[in-house]
Amino acid sequence: MSGTIGSNILSHSGTVAETAAGLNWVSTVVTASTVTVEAGNGYWINTTSNACTITLPASAEAGDNIVIVDFARTWGTNSVTLDSNGLNFQGQDDSYTVEYTTSGQSVNLIYSDSTKGWLPLEDDVVADEPVAPLTQRAIFGYGSTGSVSSLKNLVNSSGVVAADVTGVGTARSGLAAASYDGDKALFAYGLNSGGTRVSLKNLANNSGVIAADVTGVGTARDSLAAAGYGVGLAIFAYGTTGSDVSMSNLVNTSGVIAADVTGVGTARYGIAGARYGSTGQAIFAYGWSGSGTVSIKNLVTNVGVIGSDVSGVGTARSAIACAAYGDDKAIFGYGYGGSGGVSMTNLVSNLGVVASDVDGVGTARWNLAASSYGSDKAIFGFGNTGSKSSLTNKVSNSGVVAADTSGVGTARELLAAAGYSYSA
């Protein structure tokens, strides 16, 4: 069906009459939390009492038209979410979130084709774009049990760590990992069983399956960090080649690692990093430089440019871990304080501001790993407490670290972790 917007006449009874030719305005104002709409119709959506999810038709033809209008100017308080019901919306599949949050808005949707799907012919007040879903699961991989390993432990969307699975690829420790392309993960670099630094990568798909070795690009090194940034992109940075380095390697949405870029800021290793902010920035902080621990941060723009040093807040330390949480924030936790392990955290705001120390909960340790999971939470896992451990500590979506949970799987240190999968 196709339709054009014609003149509509408001009757004396307050209902909207059907036009002789054109869009049919449904007379009943929608107040429910869900509604399924049909092509050729216009709908008044009243979110005074609750948000509303609008399910679009499961099939459509080019030119099909639907209009939705903020009846009570309340979408800014209770938003409207569009479920494209298996079809694309502005070229993105229906796993993406389309939300309208501006009071007084109206949206005029036209179906184009199977590639672009539904397109807003008009979405006045603001132009909305689909937002990628957040990762739900996490994966811990590799590390040292006393000898290097290629073990992995998957983490479900509730933060439960699964038993060991033998990994694929070169066993190693001192590597780094990050999410890429939204729902996949990438492990790269590290030290192999002979103590040789390698420039390898292993991709993990959105089911958590780790692929075979691929020869990496860039300088082989260990004790580096990685973080997501931008839209589906990642960055590996810093580390040691035997000497501290300040370099980075960008990763595209296909998991391809680019050549070295000379970094900005103090060369160091034993650092950590994570994504933060609403537009895809990242942060690297702390580490060991020269002869001691440092409290330095370097912010990364949403196009992968590393900024200069900023003096950090909190106790200088290395062998630390970091993960994103709460949609747009990050948390640094634990580490080696120069004379032993510490149990402290530092929250990072959505502007990249590192807060002062908060005494952590759980066993002090270093050489651990961390990842986001469950869309807005984080988990710290494994590490060295004086001996290798398989402890985990969950982090709530407000940055509160929970008490120790006895881990499942082989105790180890110098591993890496990253988020994967849109599915819970």
Image (spheres, rainbow, N blue to C red):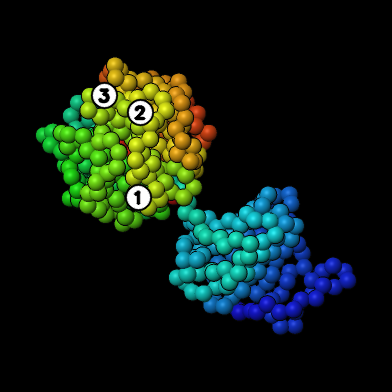
Residue placed most toward the observer, 339 or 420: 339
Q: Residues within 10 Å of mark 1 (few under 14, many from 20)?
A: many
Q: How far apart are the two marked residues, 3 and 2, measured between alpha carbons? A: 10 Å
Q: Is residue 253 left or right of residue 19?
A: left
- Residue 214, horizontal then vertical, whole percent: 20, 51
Q: Residues within 10 Å of mark 2 (few under 14, many from 20)?
A: some
User: Which residue matches tag 3?
Assistant: 292
Q: Secondary structure at mark 3?
A: strand
Residue in the picture at 19% in, 39% down: 221
Residue in the picture at 71% in, 79% down: 6
Q: Residue flagged by tag 2: what amino acid is it?
A: Ser
Q: How far apart are the two marked residues, 2 and 1, measured between alpha carbons? A: 22 Å
- Residue 325, horizontal then vertical, whole percent: 47, 38
Q: Dividing the image into 4 quarters, which one contains the N terminus?
A: bottom right
User: Which residue matches tag 1?
Assistant: 304
Residue placed most toward the observer, 60 or 288: 288
Residue in the picture at 35% in, 43% down: 307
When the figure is inspected, residue 284 is found, relative to residue 47, above or below; the finding is above
Q: Residue flagged by tag 1: what amino acid is it?
A: Gly
State which tag comes first along the sequence, 2 or 1. 2
State which tag comes first along the sequence, 1 or 3. 3
- Residue 305, horizontal then vertical, whole percent: 34, 49
Q: Is residue 38 visible?
A: no
Q: Specify the farthest residue to the left.
A: 194
- Residue 120, horizontal then vertical, whole percent: 57, 68
User: Which residue matches tag 2?
Assistant: 295
Q: Is residue 79 left or right of residue 372?
A: right
Q: Is residue 316 left or right of residue 262?
A: right
Q: Residue flagged by tag 3: what amino acid is it?
A: Gly
